[in-house]
Structures are given as C-alpha cells and as structure tokens.
Amino acid sequence: MKQKQKALWVLVAVGWMAVQGVPPVWAKAMKETTPTFLEFHGKARDLPVVFEYPKSWKPEEEKGTIEKYQLVRLMGPRNPEDTYSSYISIVGSPVKKKGGKFDNLSEIVENYKAYQLAGAHLDDEKVTVLGGLGAVDLTVTSVIPPLFQKGLRALEIPVRTRTLFTQKGGMLYQITYSADLRLYDEHVKDFNRLLETLQFE
C-alpha cells in the first residue's frame, strides 16, 4: 500500500512540474549539481581573461611562435555534412611596440576587413561595450569554396562569423564565434553567455 502511495505521489509531482515547471529550490539544486557552463581562467600573460562557456565545447589553447599571441579555441558541434565545426575563439596579442603586429584597435579591425574571403558580405558593424571596454562588433557572411575541401566533402560551406575587437592598455583582443550559416542561430545564446561573463583582468 505504501509503495502504491509513493508511486502515485511521484506521478503527481512529475505531472505538476510538466505544467508548472520545476520549483525554484529544486531548480537551484539541479543547476548546482549539473552545470551546463564551466568557467575558464586564462593564466597566460597575453590572455588574462575569465568567461563562462558551454560544458560540451572543449577548450584548446595555443601560443604563437612567429607572431606574439595567446589563443583559446572552443570547439563545438559539426555541421550535417561533417565539413565545418562551430567554434568560439579568443585571441590576445600585444600592440606593436610590445612585440605584436598592430599598433591599435582601428588597425586590427581594418586588417580583418581587408583579408576576408572573396565575396564575403559585411552584415553588421557597430560599436558596443565588452567587459567594460569599448569594442567594435562585426558580423560577416561568406562561402568557403570547395577547393578548401577534399574528396566527397568538396562542397561549398556558407558560414557566418561574428567578431568583436577591443583593447585594454597594451593588449588587443579578438573574440570570434563562427558556424555553418544553417546552425549559427542555434549557438548564439552560448556566445552571448560568454560575452556577458567575459572579464579582462
């Protein structure tokens, strides 16, 4: 009898949550035990940043050997044809007088615009605030031609890329989200979460 009552209570509770949602206290406990985002702490001198990123996106760090930069790349899902991975990257590099390639923010932005793929379209350009700093926000749509692929995967890949540029002192930062055009909107919220939690230390 007690087992039947317990089973009935569980069914009632599940049904109530399906309609009303998870109670706040339970939701908090579930969030604490099953986090969907992790926190990244950049320890390299040229990438002193903190941000939150999706748990399933694995970070890869890289240090420039010829050019002076520090990079963290978060690799996300592949497109249906398995020809392109969604990714988020953050690059930190010093200004030219400290061993970097560019003198200032406007120079790195203009260089980025100049070296887009042929036929790329600038969808949006605006000035914004990122981590308390002024930033330039660009969104570009382009098509990666088949010659970049091999064999049966030699297909054109429509890609949308959003890149933000900012500067803090003698450091320039480039924050990018790129994905197959068809999948771009699926992960925008993850990129926005990163931007909202991004701190430059």
Image (spheres, helix red, strand yellow):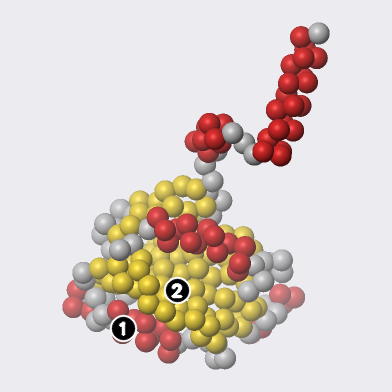
Which of the pair 67/27 is nearer the observer? 27
The picture places residue 174, in percent across and down from the top left corner, at 38, 71
Kind of residue sitting beneath label 2: Thr
Q: Is residue 161 above or below residue 132?
A: below
Query: Which residue is the extreme one toward the front?
Result: 20
Residue 123 visible, this orientation: yes
Going by the image, does 42 lie left or right of 143? left
The percent coordinates of residue 80 (x first, y second) are 71, 66
Q: Earlier in the sequence, mark 1 or mark 2?
A: 1
Q: Quadrant of residue 201?
A: bottom left
Q: Is residue 198 above or below residue 151?
A: above
Please give the residue where the numbered disc 2 appears in the rendered image: 163
- Circle 1 is placed at which residue position? 106
User: Eyeballing the image, is 152 above or below 92?
Assistant: below
How crowded is the residue under tag 2: few (<14 C-alpha within 10 Å), some, or many (20+)? many
Identify which residue, 29 or 172, lies in the foreground: 29
Which residue is pictured at 55% across the width and 91% down the height?
A: 118
